[in-house]
Amino acid sequence: MAEALQSARHYTLGLFDCFAAMGYDSLARVPHIATINPPLWELGHTAWFAEWFILREATSSHPADAARHSLLTRGDDWFDSNTVAHRSRWTLDLPGAGALKTYCHEVLDRTLDKLSREAGVDEALYPYRLALAHEDMHGEASLYTLQTLGVPVADRLLPAQLLSGPSSEIAYPGGTLVQGSAQEGGFVFDNERQAHPVYVAPFRIDAGLVTNAQFADFVADGGYQNRQYWSAAGSAWLMRQERSSPRYWQRDGEQWRTMRFGRLSTLAPSEPVRHVCLFEAQAYCAWAGRRLPGEAEWEYAALSGQAGFGWGQLWEWTSSAFEPYPGFVADRYREYSAPWFMTHQVLRGASFATPSRFASARFRNFFMPGRDDIFCGFRTCAL
């Protein structure tokens, strides 16, 4: 745990330095984009969250539930995401980057000291595991913010590039899946708890993700112009975006090129297509005569142990709305799941930017259907 916390903080600070190299350590220089936070705010918030649950021994995320004051005089006023509106994060009178880095180091040092005296039981380790998961998620969010802003990333901080996957299809017999986590120990988020049986009908699913070459065929066949492939919500999204190909794609003669962290490169045909939203994935499926898998189908396949089903290159859109499992109860981090039920869509798996310690076949990621800035792709099922 100590090594993981140190690794996560080192990564957080390394990514922040990439922002700073482009001047984005200043709030005034960061574009106002709804899908990102100013990097300076992200830096302070990540350390503040760990301080809140570990050092301040908060019993929940409610603003009154911390047992101690922050190391920062106005830490709660600056970094509590429950009370600091997104649009206001560009106008806060935050400390400078140097002061917040010092805060990050001080919180980590005190956290490691406190951890060294903890009992090795789940209840005692819960706040550390929560803070680690939170920092791992924000690390990935920082990486897709770097992509959004076109900021180069040092090679030592950039995870391995995507690999091509098998193009075959796997048939599964179906049956009863115990969906959700049944484990008593360890750590899971609240939306994954309350394990329950779900019947999964027989299905056939792609062994790998839809590739750039496959998606380029959809584009070439007028997929973005033919509205018969698009849902009503998808058509509305498409009109707002004025999109005729995936985000970051650029036509260069007979080939496609793409922007990756501020650098233009040739699009590899065999790589999984990425930075496509749910609506684009649905439209492709309608064109191809396929469908997206439900999250229970995806989990069934990932846990089956059958060779060939590869995952972990990109988060994968499913056909499932983000809903609570039966018996859902919010955890100490009360706002993690409950506010987003029924408005967000489930993605499964992990991406190349997800730390391996965080990846789980049962983990439920969730985003708004129109998000295409995240590291996401999709696979399809037979109708």
Image (cartoon, grey):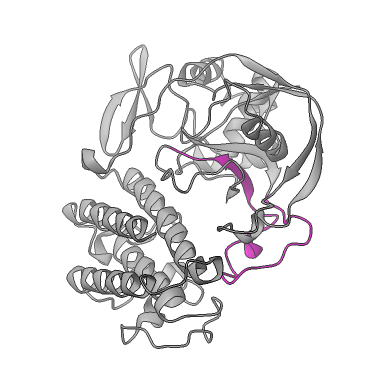
Q: Is residue 217 left or right of residue 284?
A: left
Q: Quadrant of residue 46?
A: bottom left
- Residue 319: percent from left, percent from top: 69, 38
- Nearest the eye: 221 or 8: 8
Quadrant where the N terminus sits is bottom left
Q: Position of residue 278 (x, y in %)?
A: 60, 38
Choose between 73 and 151: the one closer to the eye.
Answer: 73
Q: Position of residue 306 (x, y in %)?
A: 63, 23
Answer above or below: position of 30 versus 316.
Answer: below
Q: Main secondary structure of the magenta part?
A: loop
Q: Residue at x 33, y 76 (%)?
A: 92
Instruction: Decide if residue 101 is on the left or right side of residue 310.
Output: left
155 w.r.t. 90: above or below: above
Q: Is residue 158 above or below residue 190?
A: above
Question: Where does residue 158 sit, x and y in percent of width and height?
Answer: 29, 40
Residue plotted at (78% across, 62% down): 327
Q: Residue furthest top?
A: 254
- Residue 152 seen in render: no
Q: Is residue 241 left or right of residue 139?
A: right
* Residue found 41% across the figure and 52% down from its top: 141
Quadrant the C terminus occupies: top right
- Determine the image quadrant of residue 179: top right
Q: Is residue 104 magenta?
A: no
Please, is residue 84 above or below residue 3 in the view? Answer: below
The magenta segment is: 322-351
**Numbered circles on residues, count:** 0
Q: Residue 345 colored magenta?
A: yes
User: Which quarter of the picture shows residue 202?
Assistant: top right
Any part of residue 194 in sight? yes
Which is more toward the observer, 292 or 371? Answer: 292
Q: Residue at x 35, y 61 (%)?
A: 2
